[in-house]
Amino acid sequence: MSLRALCLLASSLLLPMSAIAQTVPDKTSPYYAAQKAAVEAALKRAPNTGRAKNVILFIGDGMGINSVTAGRIFAGQMKGKDGASYVLSFEALPYTAFSKTYSSNNLVTDSANGISAITTGFKTINGGIGVDDTVKGGVCADAATHVQTIAEQAKLSGRSIGAVTTSGITDATPAGTYGHTSTRGWRADGDLPAEAVAKGCVDLARQLVEAPEAVRLDVAMGGDLEAFLPETKGGERKDGRDLTAQWLKQKNAKFLTGKAALDALDTRTAGPVLGLFSKGDLPSPVDHPQDVPTLANMTDKAIDLLSREPDGFFLLVESASIDKWHHKNNAHRALTDVDELAQAVSVAMAKTNPEETLIIITADHSHGLVLSGYASRETPVDGVAKDKTGGVYSILSYATGPGGHDHEGELTAAETQNPDFTNPSLTKMPSAAHGGEDVPVYASGPQAYLIRSTVESAYLYQVMKRALFDVAAKAK
Ligand SMILES: [Zn+2]
């Protein structure tokens, strides 16, 4: 008999029944009481089985569980609070699941298939957007391979639709609302090979602006100004097209290039809005860029614009820079963007009625970030810890990426807490590889109760479709 079994036997023989009953503690504490109240709140929760007037899909690009945990601690500590117990806005939502993100041809997905599976219900190859899994990368995909996105379907149902992101608006995730391509890199005309052009394929910037009106975005905000302007106007288009001028041909359409213009926008009267606030991706808020809106600013205005439609709206909001900075092993800026996402979710929650708005927050894939023990609870999460032999290590490190582990001399907290610090990585490579583990999903609103268990990423499409189209609206 093992020692543990002996102890259990001895305790069961020695303890009278009354003592066993006291294994439920009679002590309490604010922490204990809060957990008790959380269970009581969960017991009162009734599933919302109704129709969703609106759906807001938030993507934390590359936001795996470790990004959420480290991001929560970082956000709390940056606000002068206890990081470990801090709660990001979306963590308070009632329903969660795990999502399996692999693509039709890879164990680990890129952002193209990552979003496409969620917005179309079909997994495709890495690099594919709005297409099925029969396409070949680099080869123009014919129309038979195209699959409608949830945004296009929402527009056809009478709703207004939008996409806002901190990446370029022709990057993979926002293109998951309007794009159909085998090859995510075809963002401006100069990116397409002659064979693809000959077969009739067009770049994603043109797809956004030239989509049939019946499925065209009403609001699009992010970066990538250069993909919309000809070289003669400071852009990178070789075909001489000015897509911003084309956009402005729509009734009451607006084209914005700065935060001041976005702040001044009259959202009660504006028609379709295209906001391109930088070339390429938007800069990090850590660097205090001038005249660039935050994700929360863009989300706020997008909801004001889209919610004018009485039939409701679909909005995709992407915090893209989580991924962009993880690729550089820059945990400080990546985790800053987890909080940017949380703030955008707070704005959406404050501006919408939870009874009629399905809100989903998830990631398209993870990243190889690790949060390693055993620093004291007060230690800054971007600081250092000591192992038992006195060796100092960075609490945050990566599986892959430019950081490497050839640091000379002892790491210091001052070094690792510098926003420009490149966190260490096990395998050195120019750009960190995505992580392949399941990612979290958080949800509230109509049909959100179906977000549970371990699901395929494409399952989220089915939940949004059901919420928007398949259940009857409640009689008023
Ligand atoms: Zn990435």
Image (cartoon, rainbow, N blue to C red):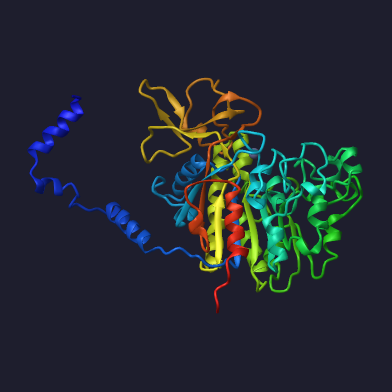
Is 210 on the left-hand or right-hand side of 116?
right
Is 175 on the left-hand or right-hand side of 444?
right
The one nearer the camera, 255 or 263, is 255
Who's the residue at 45% across and 57% down the image? 94
Q: Which percent across, then down, holds residue 145?
A: 77, 46
The one nearer the camera, 419 or 96, is 96
Ligand 1 visible in quadrant = top right
**The C terminus - image quarter:** bottom right
Farthest-out residue, bottom: 476
Who's the residue at 20% across and 25% down the image? 2
Q: Is residue 299 positioned above or below 85 on the image?
A: below
Count of number-bearing discs: 0
**The N terminus - image quarter:** top left
Mark yes or no: residue 174 visible.
Answer: yes
Q: Which percent across, then down, holds residue 325?
A: 61, 39
Residue 210 in which image quadrant: bottom right
